[in-house]
Image (cartoon, helix red, strand yellow):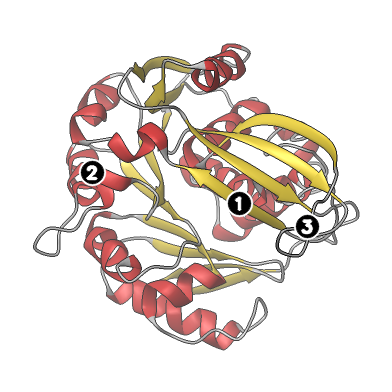
Amino acid sequence: MTGGIVCAGNWIVDIVHVIDRWPEKSQLVTIAKEVEGIGGGAANVLLALDAFGVDVPLFAMGLVGNDPHGATCRAALARSRVDLRWLVSTPKAMTAHTHVMTLPGDSRTFFYHPGCNDLLGETDLPVEAAAQAGARLFYLGYLNLLGALDALQDGQTAAARVLARARAAGMVTCVDLVSKAGPEFAAVVAASLPQIDYLFLNEVEAALATGIPISGPADQAGINAAARALLDGGVHQAVIIHTPALGLWAARYGVVTRAPDPVVVIVNPLGAGDAFCAGVIWGIHEGWTPDRALALGHRAAAECLKGETATGSIPDLNVLLAGL
């Protein structure tokens, strides 16, 4: 095996509640079904890569609590091939968890407790050791949902310093964002742009990060303008924007777009963006063309939509690559 991928950042237990309608304030709605799984950028991308059956080492990095949710994370990972040496249990806070209210075929709403994700600091991310272990790609997700790593001081963040260390150690850096609006969203992203090789985000996050209006998932002009602004802000290789209408790979040499395959089944949209990210990251790791990497990302996202949890329905690469 050559190479390897580190996934660091958010480790979350998702408790997915399936409901048939959204209640008015003070009203009651019945939960028809409840499913528990792990989520967050690091967990979803890592377990999607494991589901692909990739033939390189996979490393987990981050914090979970000494609690039942932490045990859920470790149990899920124990069924994978993931190396857990840098996933640390802490007594200082609970494991992050989210109550996800899902309307099948429609939308989902998140109630999030950050727990120990907000405590994750620079010393918890030994990127140099990972590089020495052979890893050549470092993923961090999600910016603006990482508490201590996102904290701004004189225009800089700890996340940017971690990414700089990863690049100095010889790893390619990939960063994903989250759709959490706030007054410092753009500044937190801007601090890290010069240390990012590949930036992943959706159209909502692109608008938040740049201030450029994007009218919707198919607004390619607005999406192109936002991608260019992020490249001008310092992204080294490519800005990769995913929407329900398109996947876009914007680099300094030009732009590649690819429409997703038609989606036949949508059980739950939870984790689809992370599945897309995992597919493209595998293409980056393997040196594929942008179009082929986007194609795998779209396939992975479509398969993710068929499951009740973020990674439970993702098949291996033989299935995903059939006909590509």
* Label 2 environment density (alpha carbons within 10 Å; few <14, some 14–19, many ≥20): many
**Residue 210 x, y percent position in the rendering:** 38, 78
Q: Which residue is mark 3?
A: 27
Q: Residue at x 44, y 38 (%)?
A: 10
| SS type, badge 3 | loop
Q: Position of residue 278 (x, y in %)?
A: 57, 43
Which residue is pictured at 47% across the width and 37% down the height? 42
Q: Mark 1: which amino acid?
A: Phe
Q: Residue furthest right?
A: 264
Residue toward you, 158 or 15:
15
Tags 2 and 3 touching, CB below 8 Å? no
Measured along the vertical axis of the image, is residue 23 above or below residue 85? below
Residue at the left extreme of this rendering: 154
The answer to whether residue 227 is left or right of residue 106 is left
Question: Residue 131 lies in what quarter of the image?
Answer: top left
Q: Earlier in the sequence, mark 1 or mark 3?
A: 3
Q: Which mark is residue 167?
A: 2
Q: Is residue 182 above or below residue 151?
A: below
Q: Residues within 10 Å of mark 1 (few under 14, many from 20)?
A: some
Q: In the picture shown, does residue 275 fall above or below 240?
A: above
Real-space Cα distance between discs 1 and 3? Answer: 18 Å
- The residue tagged 1 is 110
Q: Secondary structure at mark 2?
A: helix
> In the rendered structure, are the residues bearing label 1 and label 2 in contact, judged by CB atoms less than 8 Å apart?
no
Please name the amino acid that badge 3 sits on. Gln
Q: x, y (%) of residue 59?
A: 42, 23
Front tag of 1 and 2? 1
Counting residues from the start of the chain, the first of labels 1 and 2 encountered is 1
